[in-house]
Image (tube, rainbow, N blue to C red):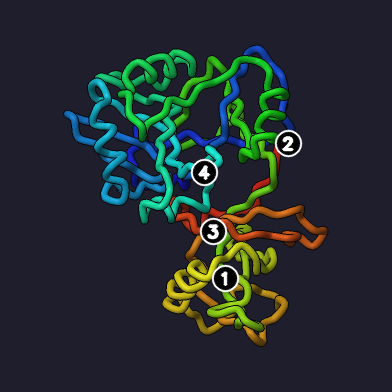
């Protein structure tokens, strides 16, 4: 989240740092890393407001979840992840659009509690906050409490790999809640490489494909846009059509990059404003994504906040 967000600090989510490997530590707890998007829920006088990570009110889009949270005991501000569950019982980011069309099961996975009953809980230890969160959550098919495991992060990570989960979260058990800040008290360990990207253009369709051939991808580097490759896989026909409809409204006269990139002759440039997510094999020596696969659009992050995510070794 940008620190320029207009979301009040009491509602700003704490952010995790990407780390390079799982670990064992009795002073840490480990949770599933859900493959959805962040959602802060504010319950006040029985009424619910849902906020995305970048501060947008999204209650109308997820009325069923908001109604389920009306069962929370007392006023509260809850942090969690909204996910869509596939037939395999696992959350998949790609299914969130289907969930809006009632073609996949939505679930709000609550994992932290910022305040309850008018009391600010952010300075309390994580495990104390989680205990209080579990006590106020209603029993409802659309709401889940995010369980945790103490200590064995390496075994938990191996289980996540077998289940084909996105990864795990590692959290210091006694850590406070740092609203709007990215800290080393919360770490994320991914089972596969993923990166948020900004769409800078699209190429002309080829062979039997309709609408476009590939997306031109960028990340922010200082005050400029950095080219990081093209993605041409991961699209259904419906995704191609819907995405093309959004992109043609953003057409721009010139490239946002200082240097030339491949396939410029068949590229339509767009205003760099749509954020997407891709999975990929590795970064090349040129700073481009190898074998990227499109996963979907993200509406919870601003384009100018999208930078290359680099794993940090745990200190």
Few, some or many C-alpha atoms within 10 Å of disc 3 (few <14, some 14-19, many ≥20)? Answer: many
Provide the secondary structure element on which disc 1 rests.
strand
Few, some or many C-alpha atoms within 10 Å of disc 2 (few <14, some 14-19, many ≥20)? Answer: some
Q: Which residue is mark 2?
A: 20
Provide the secondary structure element on which disc 2 rests.
loop
The image shows residue 179 at horizontal and vertical percentages of: 44, 32
> Which image quarter is the C terminus in?
top right
> CB under 8 Å between callouts 4 and 2?
no
Residue visible at 59% across and 19% down in the picture? 29
Earlier in the chain: of badge 1 and badge 4, it is 4
Earlier in the chain: of badge 2 and badge 1, it is 2
Q: Which residue is mark 4?
A: 87
**Could you tell me how far apart the alpha carbons at marks 3 and 4 are, in whole angstroms?**
24 Å
The answer to whether residue 230 is left or right of residue 46 is right
> CB under 8 Å between callouts 3 and 4?
no
Q: Is 276 placed above or below 106 here?
A: below
**Could you tell me how far apart the alpha carbons at marks 1 and 4 are, in whole angstroms?**
34 Å
Q: Which residue is mark 3?
A: 276
Earlier in the chain: of badge 4 and badge 2, it is 2
The image shows residue 77 at horizontal and vertical percentages of: 32, 29
The image shows residue 71 at horizontal and vertical percentages of: 24, 27
**Could you tell me how far apart the alpha carbons at marks 4 and 2 are, in whole angstroms?**
30 Å
Provide the secondary structure element on which disc 3 rests.
strand
Earlier in the chain: of badge 3 and badge 1, it is 1
């Amino acid at each position: 989240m940008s620190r320029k967000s207009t979301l009040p600090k009491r509602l700003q989510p704490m952010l995790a740092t990407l780390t390079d490997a799982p670990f064992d530590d009795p002073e840490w707890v480990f949770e599933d890393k859900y493959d959805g998007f962040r959602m802060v829920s504010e319950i006040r006088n029985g009424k619910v407001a849902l906020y995305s990570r970048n501060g947008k009110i999204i209650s109308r889009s997820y009325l069923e979840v908001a109604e389920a949270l009306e069962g929370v005991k007392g006023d509260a501000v809850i942090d969690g992840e909204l996910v869509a569950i596939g037939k395999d019982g696992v959350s998949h980011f790609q299914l969130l659009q289907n969930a809006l069309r009632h073609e996949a099961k939505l679930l709000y996975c609550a994992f932290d509690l910022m305040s309850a009953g008018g009391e600010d809980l952010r300075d309390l230890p994580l495990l104390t906050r989680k205990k209080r969160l579990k006590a106020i959550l209603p029993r409802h098919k659309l709401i889940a409490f995010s369980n945790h495991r103490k200590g064995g992060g390496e075994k938990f990570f191996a289980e996540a790999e077998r289940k084909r989960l996105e990864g795990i979260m590692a959290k210091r058990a006694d850590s406070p809640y740092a609203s709007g800040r990215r800290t080393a008290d919360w770490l994320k360990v991914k089972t596969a490489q993923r990166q948020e990207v900004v769409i800078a253009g699209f190429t002309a369709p080829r062979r039997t494909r309709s609408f476009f051939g590939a997306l031109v991808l960028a990340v922010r580097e200082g005050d400029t846009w950095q080219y990081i490759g093209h993605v041409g896989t991961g699209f259904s026909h419906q995704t191609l059509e819907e995405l093309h409809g959004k992109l043609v409204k953003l057409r721009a006269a010139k490239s946002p990059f200082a240097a030339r990139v491949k396939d410029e002759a068949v590229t339509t440039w767009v205003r760099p404003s749509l954020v997407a997510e891709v999975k990929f094999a590795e970064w090349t020596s040129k700073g481009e994504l190898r074998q990227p696969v499109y996963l979907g659009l993200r509406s919870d992050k601003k384009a100018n906040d999208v930078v290359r995510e680099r794993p940090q070794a745990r200190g």
